[in-house]
Image (tube, rainbow, N blue to C red):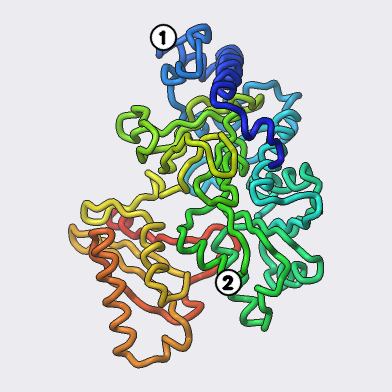
């Protein structure tokens, strides 16, 4: 562990710290952020009403739209002269969401990312290759800070230039890799085409996040690379990567609760749900200075578990993200997450781990077509064999998810590759709505 004293703290001591820090944060935003002062006043809440961490449910929610409405800096709780860094989302679905950091925030970021890397037993003896993007995206720099805090050698290569990535792993002796899971698969594919046996590389652990991925994809990555694949979670609005991480037990992601209070709510009613219930993750920052968001609705779907982990850590664990309320597909009344389809495909195990969902509308009915790559050998096999596999996938999708889909097996490299987040869904239904 990076910080054993904190990571194994008793639940009662954690609650005391959370209460103290929540009270200070609520007072801070009420005093310094007009948006929150108005929201609290409308809800009839004053900072002094927060007597314990249990009172967090009295506070109003914050949404991504609130960040866009207050673009760029109106939610900052620190004066401009104390802000040392800004990051921002890509803005692909609307105005960018801008986040800020003070010097202390950067130190907090380094701390939680050091704990994350510690979950994979990274030490100062390791060489960490960071293939997340650097820039306004928080991924690259977040892992970078944590690796430097641990004392490891950092290789800040960023994304892309895959042949060079593989060469550096071999020549430098990279022992830990950080990137998106889909890029890991792409690197494995490139390695095979260039005669590189990735199992011979010195990499022993990978820290993968920034996009949904299934346990079946984890199994494939671990088998391809002969490594331990650790799921990490973060979002720029809260701090970036470092909000939570799996340990080597791979039994849920530890949320660093001395910095972030997490809840699971019913996404329709906003009601807080008990442990073991599936719902939307909500985070409150209790140590951030620049942008301490209150009850931020992530739209990510998960489950919480407060039981002590076998690794000894006591911080609450969240189930790997099971989808999002805003990228959930509704196909003829059935809720479908891309990660569920991915899990079915990988469970069948006769296709490549590259797929795309094409959603269209024929008349008044939604139509789902799943494109799945198969190996060159299988694609060149007899037509009957391909038809049998397509039928098998259709049956499994219907059986597991309760939705009918057309399946199209395509040859290798048909589906566009990504060095960042993979584009899994093409939804053409909006075109029809606009006509």
Q: Nearer the viewer, mark 2 or mark 1?
A: 2
- Residue at (81%, 70%) from the top-left corner? 171
- Residue at (69%, 42%) from the top-left corner? 1
Task: From the top left corner, tell me how far across and down residue 76 is, in percent.
Answer: 62, 25
Q: Quadrant of residue 228?
A: bottom right
- Residue at (41%, 77%) from the top-left corner? 350
Looking at the image, residue 220 lies above or below residue 228:
below
Q: Which residue bears the numbered disc 2? A: 224
In the rendering, which numbered label is found on residue 44? 1
20 vs 434, left or right, is right
Label 2 secondary element: helix
Query: Can residue 110 be seen in the rendering of this structure?
Result: yes
Q: CA distance from mark 2 to mark 1?
A: 56 Å
**Crowdedness near tag 1: few (<14), some (14–19) or many (≥20) residues, C-alpha within 10 Å:** few
Q: Quadrant of the C terminus?
A: bottom left
Task: From the top left corner, tell me how far across and down residue 32 is, in percent.
Answer: 61, 15
């Amino acid at each position: 562990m990076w910080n054993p004293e904190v990571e194994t703290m008793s639940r009662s001591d954690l609650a005391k710290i959370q209460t103290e820090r929540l009270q200070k944060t609520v007072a801070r935003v009420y005093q310094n952020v007009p948006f929150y002062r108005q929201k609290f006043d409308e809800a009839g809440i004053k900072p002094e009403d927060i007597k314990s961490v249990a009172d967090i449910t009295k506070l109003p929610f914050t949404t991504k739209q609130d960040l866009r409405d207050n673009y760029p800096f109106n939610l900052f709780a620190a004066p401009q002269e104390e802000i040392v860094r800004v990051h921002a989302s890509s803005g692909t679905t609307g105005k960018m969401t801008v986040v800020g950091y003070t010097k202390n925030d950067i130190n907090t970021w380094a701390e939680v990312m050091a704990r994350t890397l510690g979950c994979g037993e990274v030490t100062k003896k390791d060489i960490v290759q960071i293939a997340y993007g650097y820039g306004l995206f928080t991924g690259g720099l977040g892992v970078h800070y944590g690796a430097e805090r641990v004392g490891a050698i950092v290789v800040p290569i960023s994304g892309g230039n895959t042949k060079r990535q593989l060469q550096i792993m071999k020549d430098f002796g990279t022992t830990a890799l950080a990137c998106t899971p889909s890029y890991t698969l792409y690197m494995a594919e490139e390695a095979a085409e260039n005669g590189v046996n990735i199992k011979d590389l010195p990499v022993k652990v990978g820290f993968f996040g920034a996009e949904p991925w299934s346990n079946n994809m984890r199994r494939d990555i671990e088998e391809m690379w002969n490594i331990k694949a650790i799921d990490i979670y973060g979002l720029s609005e809260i701090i970036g990567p470092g909000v939570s991480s799996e340990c080597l037990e791979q039994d849920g992601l530890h949320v660093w609760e001395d910095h972030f209070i997490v809840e699971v709510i019913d996404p329709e009613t906003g009601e807080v749900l008990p442990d073991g219930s599936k719902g939307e993750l909500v985070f409150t920052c209790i140590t951030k200075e620049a942008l301490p968001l209150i009850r931020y609705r992530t739209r990510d779907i998960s489950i919480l578990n407060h039981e002590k982990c076998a690794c000894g850590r006591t911080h609450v664990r969240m189930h790997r993200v099971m989808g999002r309320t805003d990228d959930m597909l509704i196909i003829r009344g059935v809720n479908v997450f891309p990660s569920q389809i991915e899990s079915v495909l990988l469970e069948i195990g006769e296709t490549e781990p590259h797929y795309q969902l094409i959603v269209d509308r024929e008349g008044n009915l939604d139509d789902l077509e799943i494109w799945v790559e198969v190996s060159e050998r299988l694609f060149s096999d007899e037509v009957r064999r391909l038809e049998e596999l397509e039928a098998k996938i259709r049956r499994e999708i219907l059986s597991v998810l309760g939705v009918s889909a057309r399946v199209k097996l395509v040859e290798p490299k048909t589906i566009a590759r990504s060095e960042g987040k993979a584009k899994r869904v093409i939804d053409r239904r909006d075109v029809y709505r606009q006509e």
